Image (cartoon, rainbow, N blue to C red):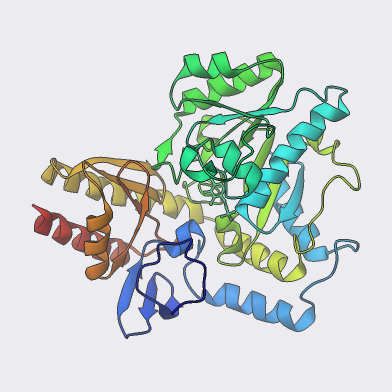
């Protein structure tokens, strides 16, 4: 009997070892892991380069307080700002912490401008920004907030996905920021089109609202660009990231422009563990790989191949697969019916995937996945489609 709280519906499977794209279960089975901790292990399991980085840092210093300078964090922040829109970075330990810090930055920015009442955050209804109290109310999903009231006072408004009228109606002079995921992960791998992001930026400029793009799941190379929003050429004000940046080590971060960063004066935010040397060394090692020449180009190339093949599969099974969604290696196979049985059958055939909303089977290979591994996954998915008919 487990002594863990039953807040998860766990699958009856445990692992003793992981290597690259594969996981080895405690009962001796080998699985192709296209969950990768939900887009966390961006370089696969037990990546030798990351293992070396964490081992070496562990012999030097694990943790010091943010009361002191942490050179590894200085370096990671510098590299992130040099490669992206950002001027400054705050480090956290998780995605929800990063989205919450993003909200704090937005509110504090208007406070520092003498507009403390411009503090409401506008999000997509039924989106996902994490599981802390503020983040669940940001998500605006009944399922996540039920039983965790009080419902008022958190300062979030919502609009419907894809409904521009509802968006415009929801904006008031109290709106401080619009926060959305460029590709909704938990929400069913729904990408916001580039032209929508540009229009959103335009609205934000006109109404003097900040644009927060939550790249916790779709960021750090997952889309084939470092950030998913890059293809739109839009410049956000604040971008929380997490999952992929640690390659399996918990790291969150908020990237921002200097305009908003100036509001975060000493004492406005902090984290005991955020930005510790161990985490920062791993983050730097992840960037060493992702910033390597040709790395992201390869993600795009293999993604194109995978999408092509999945679309062929969709054409072969038009009554089963409704749509192949996503971008880069953030892929959703939307079925016409509930996807639970399909995911179970994939698992029986040694391919691990995970659900998302709207009957979507989420497929998240590591970013350094091999073509032969994609082919193996395709073979298994095709077999399961066949059995399904
Ligand atoms: C996973 C996720 C979060 C929350 O991250 P945690 O590390 O679980 O707190 C926030 N936003 C998005 C878009 C996510 O996918």
Instruction: Quadrant for residue 215, please give it.
Output: top right
Q: How far from the left and from the top, in percent, is residue 79?
A: 71, 53
* Residue 41 horizontal side relative to residue 176, left or right: left
Q: Going 10% across and 59% down the picture, which residue do you hit?
A: 387
Q: Please give left or right for residue 157 compared with residue 105 in the image.
A: left
Q: Nearer the viewer, residue 91 or 267?
A: 267
Q: Quadrant of residue 260?
A: top right
254 above or below 232?
A: below
Residue 233 visible here: no
Q: Is residue 176 shown left or right of residue 147?
A: right
Q: In the picture shown, does residue 250 fall above or below 306?
A: below
Q: Residue at x 64, y 38 (%)?
A: 150
Vertical side of 379 occupied by 115: above or below:
above
131 or 193: nearer the eye?
131
Where's residue 349, x and y in %? 22, 69
- Residue 344 spot, x, y in % from top left: 25, 62
Q: In the visual, does 309 lie left or right of 183?
A: left
Q: Nearer the viewer, residue 131 or 5?
A: 5
Q: Is residue 117 visible to us here?
A: yes
Where 70 falls versus 359 (above or below)?
below
Which part of the image, by quadrant, shows the N terminus? bottom left
Q: How many marks?
A: 0
> What is the x, y in percent for residue 161?
45, 27
């Amino acid at each position: 009997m487990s002594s863990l709280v039953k807040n998860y519906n766990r699958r009856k499977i445990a692992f003793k070892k992981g290597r690259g794209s594969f996981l080895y279960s405690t009962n001796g089975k080998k699985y192709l892991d296209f969950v990768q901790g939900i887009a966390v292990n961006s370089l696969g399991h037990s990546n030798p380069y990351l293992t070396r980085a964490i081992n070496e840092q562990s012999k030097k210093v694990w943790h010091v307080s943010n009361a002191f300078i942490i050179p590894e964090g200085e370096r990671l922040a510098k590299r992130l700002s040099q490669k992206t829109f950002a001027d400054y970075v705050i480090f956290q330990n998780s995605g929800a912490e990063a989205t919450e810090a993003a909200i704090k930055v937005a509110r504090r920015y208007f406070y520092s401008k003498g507009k403390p009442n411009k503090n409401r955050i506008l999000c997509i209804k039924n989106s996902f920004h994490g599981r802390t109290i503020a983040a669940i109310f940001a998500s605006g999903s009944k399922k996540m907030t039920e039983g965790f009231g009080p419902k008022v006072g958190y300062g979030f408004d919502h609009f419907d996905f894809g409904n521009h009228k509802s968006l415009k109606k929801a904006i008031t002079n109290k709106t401080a920021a619009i926060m959305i995921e460029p590709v909704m992960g938990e929400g069913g791998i729904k990408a916001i089109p580039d032209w929508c992001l540009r229009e959103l930026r335009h609205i934000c400029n006109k109404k003097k609202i900040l644009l927060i793009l939550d790249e916790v799941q779709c960021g750090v190379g997952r889309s084939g660009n470092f950030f998913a929003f890059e293809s739109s050429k839009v410049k956000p004000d604040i971008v929380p990231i997490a999952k992929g940046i640690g390659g399996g080590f918990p790291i969150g971060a908020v990237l921002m422009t200097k305009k908003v960063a100036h509001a975060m004066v000493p004492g406005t935010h902090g984290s005991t563990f955020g930005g510790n040397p161990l985490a920062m060394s791993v983050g730097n090692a992840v960037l060493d790989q992702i910033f390597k020449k040709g790395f992201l180009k390869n993600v795009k190339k293999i993604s194109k191949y995978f999408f092509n093949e999945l679309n062929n599969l969709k054409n072969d099974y038009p009554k089963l697969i409704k749509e192949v969604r996503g971008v880069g290696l953030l892929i959703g196979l939307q079925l016409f019916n509930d996807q639970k049985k399909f995911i179970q059958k994939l698992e029986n055939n040694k391919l691990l995937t995970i659900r998302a909303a709207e009957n979507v089977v989420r497929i998240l290979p590591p970013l350094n996945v091999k073509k032969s591994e994609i082919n193996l996954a395709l073979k298994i998915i095709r077999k399961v489609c066949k059995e399904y008919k």
